[in-house]
């Protein structure tokens, strides 16, 4: 990793792509640094690698990039990474996952990104997921997907939590 600060951006990008396939805290730290690098190609490789990170350790970085990157491409990549990581089963409580996906919906700038978040939301089994999906019914660009998500969630919850459904 000491070779990462070298002068050749192509070499740095190649090394970052290799590090992205080795999910360690050192690799993640190198990708975090690359995502804020002054060299555009290195920054792009860092963001893309963070978006493909295999676990939720990259979530805070991706949320920050999705909220504040000057690059629309980086914001979209980061947002898709947030949605993908939020949907991966883990020890996170379902209401926290619903909150993450709700935040992703508020950051989404296109219907396709919102549809991705709704698809992930439909896999949850918690009343808060139903609340988030219901809040999207007023968006004409995704109202059909939101309605489908609400119905799927209501059917699931009817079996486990009839009051919430």
Image (cartoon, grey):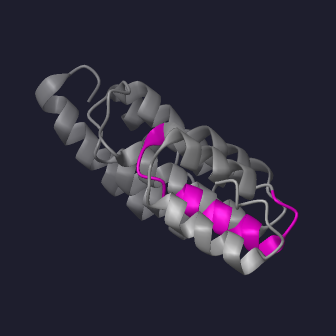
User: In the rendered image of this protein, does residue 103 appear above or below residue 149?
Assistant: above
Instruction: Tell me which residue sits at (55%, 68%) in the image.
Output: 17
Q: Is residue 24 left or right of residue 68?
A: left
Magenta range is 37-56
Q: Residue furthest front?
A: 2
User: In the rendered image of this protein, does residue 2 appear above or below residue 162?
Assistant: below
Considering the whole magenta stretch, tell me its main secondary structure. helix
User: In the rendered image of this protein, does residue 145 appear above or below residue 126?
Assistant: below
* Camera-nearest residue between 157 and 49: 49
- Residue 130: x and y in percent read 37, 36
Position of the C terminus, as image quadrant, is: top left
- Residue 160: x and y in percent read 15, 25
- Residue 83: x and y in percent read 48, 52
Instruction: Tell me which residue sits at (37%, 51%) in the image.
Output: 120
What is the count of numbered marks?
Answer: 0
Task: Tell me, yes or no, if residue 12 can be seen here.
Answer: yes
Task: Tell me, yes or no, if residue 140 can be seen here.
Answer: no
- Residue 155: x and y in percent read 18, 40
* Camera-nearest residue between 104 and 156: 104
Q: Residue furthest right?
A: 38
Q: Residue furthest bottom?
A: 10
Which of the 4 quarters of the picture holds residue 144? bottom left
- Is residue 120 magenta-colored? no
Q: Is residue 46 left or right of residue 97?
A: right
- Is residue 41 magenta-colored? yes
Position of the N terminus, as image quadrant, is: bottom right
Instruction: Tell me which residue sits at (66%, 72%) in the image.
Output: 13
């Amino acid at each position: 990793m000491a070779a990462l600060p070298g002068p050749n951006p192509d070499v740095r990008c190649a090394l970052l792509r290799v590090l992205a396939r080795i999910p360690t805290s050192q690799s993640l730290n190198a990708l975090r640094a690359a995502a804020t690098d002054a060299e555009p190609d290195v920054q792009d490789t860092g963001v893309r690698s963070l978006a493909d990170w295999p676990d939720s350790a990259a979530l805070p970085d991706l949320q920050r990039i999705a909220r504040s990157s000057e690059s629309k491409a980086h914001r979209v990549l980061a947002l898709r990474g947030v949605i993908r990581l939020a949907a991966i089963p883990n020890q996170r409580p379902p209401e926290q996952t619903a909150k993450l996906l709700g935040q992703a919906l508020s950051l989404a700038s296109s219907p396709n990104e919102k549809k991705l978040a709704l698809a992930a939301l439909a896999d949850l089994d918690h009343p808060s997921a139903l609340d988030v999906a219901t809040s999207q019914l007023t968006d004409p660009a995704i109202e059909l997907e939101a309605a489908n998500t609400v119905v799927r969630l209501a059917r699931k919850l009817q079996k486990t939590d009839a009051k919430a459904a």
